[in-house]
Amino acid sequence: MRKLIAALCTSAALLAGAPASANIPAADFTLASLKDGNLKLSEQRGEVIMLNFWASWCGPCREEMPLLNDLHARYEPVGFQVWGVNVDANREDAQAMLNKIPVEFPVLFDSQSDVSKLFGVEAMPSSVFIDRDGKVRYVHKGYRSGDEAEYKKIIKELIRE
């Protein structure tokens, strides 16, 4: 019951437009991964995680993917990971996009949008930054060219803590 209440509080805070620095516990989840079996968020404590919610039909998502791959490669050695959470109902749609825009970071499948709902995702793409203690620290909705500068600033801040 405590986990359910925490998840609902997390979702409610994000839906209500939580401040850029939310600092609330991230709802735990397990999702199937394209390459790595199932991945569970709580098993990543000690790492900084950027959950990036995306869909194959989303133009800004396609534009952002190579940039996220670069961020993952650059900062993974210092404890940062991008997790791409695909929300397509049909996994084959996601796979078709990944065939055209391959990435090295873990890609997870949320075809029922359960995890998206936990995090109050309303826009594609949306990114949720989680610190080493498992707390949501920043939420970024949408993507425009140049947003990666803000991502780098957030990543550097969180990996230094």
Image (cartoon, grey):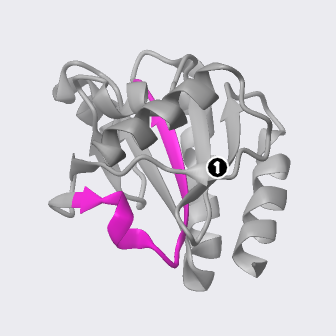
Q: Decide if residue 33 is in sight here.
A: no
Displayed quadrant of residue 157? bottom right
Tell me if I can see residue 128 in this picture.
Answer: yes
Residue 11 shown left or right of residue 29 in the figure? right
Q: Nearer the viewer, residue 87 or 27?
A: 27
Residue kind at label 1, given as amino acid type: Leu
Question: How busy is the neighbourhood of tag 1: few (under 14 within 10 Å), some, or many (20 plus)?
Answer: some
The residue that label 1 is drawn on is: 67
In this rendering, the answer to whether 93 lies above or below 150 is: above
Left or right of residue 161: residue 108:
left
Which secondary structure lies at badge 1? Answer: helix
Q: Residue at x 55, y 29 (%)?
A: 61
Q: Position of residue 1 (x, y in %)?
A: 27, 42
Please state the extent of the stretch shown in magenta in the rendering: 39-55
- Which residue is pictured at 64% across the width and 72% down the height? 74
Asked if the magenta segment contains residue 51, the reply would be yes
Which residue is drawn at the image coordinates 43% and 45% (left, top)?
Answer: 84
Q: Position of residue 59 (x, y in %)?
A: 56, 19
Q: Is residue 14 above or below residue 109?
A: above
Q: Is residue 46 left or right of residue 153?
A: left
Q: Residue 62: where, in percent of width, then height? A: 53, 30
Q: Is residue 144 magenta?
A: no
| Image spot of residue 13 (x, y percent) | 62, 30
Compared with 64, 158 (above or below) is: below
